[in-house]
Image: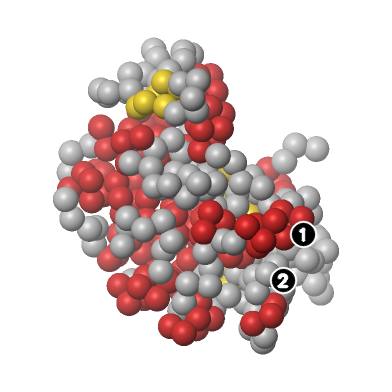
Amino acid sequence: MTENIDINETEVLKQYPEVLEMLLKDHTTQQNIYWATNSYADRGKGYQFKDAITIDRITGDNGMIIRPRSVKSKDEQTKRSKDMAEVFTPSWVCNAQNNLIDDAWFGKQGVFNSESPDHTWKAISGKIEYPEGKTWKDYVRDTRLEITCGEAPYLVSRYDTVSGMPIELTERIGLLDRKLRVVSENTETTGEFLDWCQEAYKNTYGYEWQGDNLLLAREALLFTFLDYYKAKFGEDPLLKSIQYIAYIISWNVWQMDGLKFCPPGEEPCEGDLFNPSNLCLIRDWRKPRDKQKIYFKSLLKS
């Protein structure tokens, strides 16, 4: 199931029932994420802009209605670009820009791969080396955020979001892919690997307006974890490990209007005695547990 770019929610439900429920969770509203698009409105009740995305609406007879952009019809791609300014970035561009981030962090170029003029790249072989004063653990813990993330091509790269072509694990270029490569290179036991995978996920964030894209992004992050674990140990992780990664993802990749810092289609409310705030919550996992939930807006400098 991990090899197909178009993840079947019905199969996810069969294999990991509680996981799909978690991937639909919104921690700001304490409800499910919602469509936040009219692309599915002709399906009737349950598929309107503010309707929640529920398991029964995307599985069984309703399965496979949420599909990556690359396998949507050209008409649908054009319509979503026009209506929602939806534009997806080719993987080679994501790679080039992600490389700039790492060039700055490492103080040199070509740490993870070398780029070619024909818009391809080749992964650097051997273990990643770190500049003086920095370690692989520092890299894993460094915070990364993809804004208006769509299907999250800057974070994970199981496939090219434009062409739909799968990308081999060793050649993946996402910001989280790079962290997981580092974790794989520097851990031996399943326990150590899982601990540092969790650190990688806890320090990787993204937000998106449209609920279908958000689910695709969350699924891509989850299946990326499965891909790296299986490549390392030759088997799938335990269900409880999958569930915890899904829980982290449900906090760190969230639904938000990036201009108003609240759920799409709403007006921001700071909150008072009579009206609770609707500003989007995220989690800062480094803080004491009772102080981890924070408003994303509070992180922005005035």
Rendered view: 57 above or below 69: below
The residue where tag 1 is placed is: 83
Rendered view: 210 above or below 63: above
Q: Quadrant of the C terminus?
A: top right
Q: Which residue is nearer to you in this view: 96 or 148?
A: 96
**In the drawing, does residue 33 fall left or right of residue 289?**
right
- Dot 1: what SS? helix
Crowding at mark 1 (Cα within 10 Å: few <14, some 14-19, many 20+): few
Q: Quadrant of the N terminus?
A: bottom left
Q: Residue at x 54, y 46 (%)?
A: 162
Residue 256, percent across and down? 68, 57
Q: Residue at x 81, y 61 (%)?
A: 268
Counting the numbered discs, the total is 2
- Quarter occupied by residue 4: bottom left
Residue contact at pointers 1 and 2, CB within 8 angstroms: yes
Q: Which residue is nearer to you in this view: 153 or 250?
A: 153
Crowding at mark 2 (Cα within 10 Å: few <14, some 14-19, many 20+): some
The residue where tag 2 is placed is: 38
| Observer able to see residue 191 | no
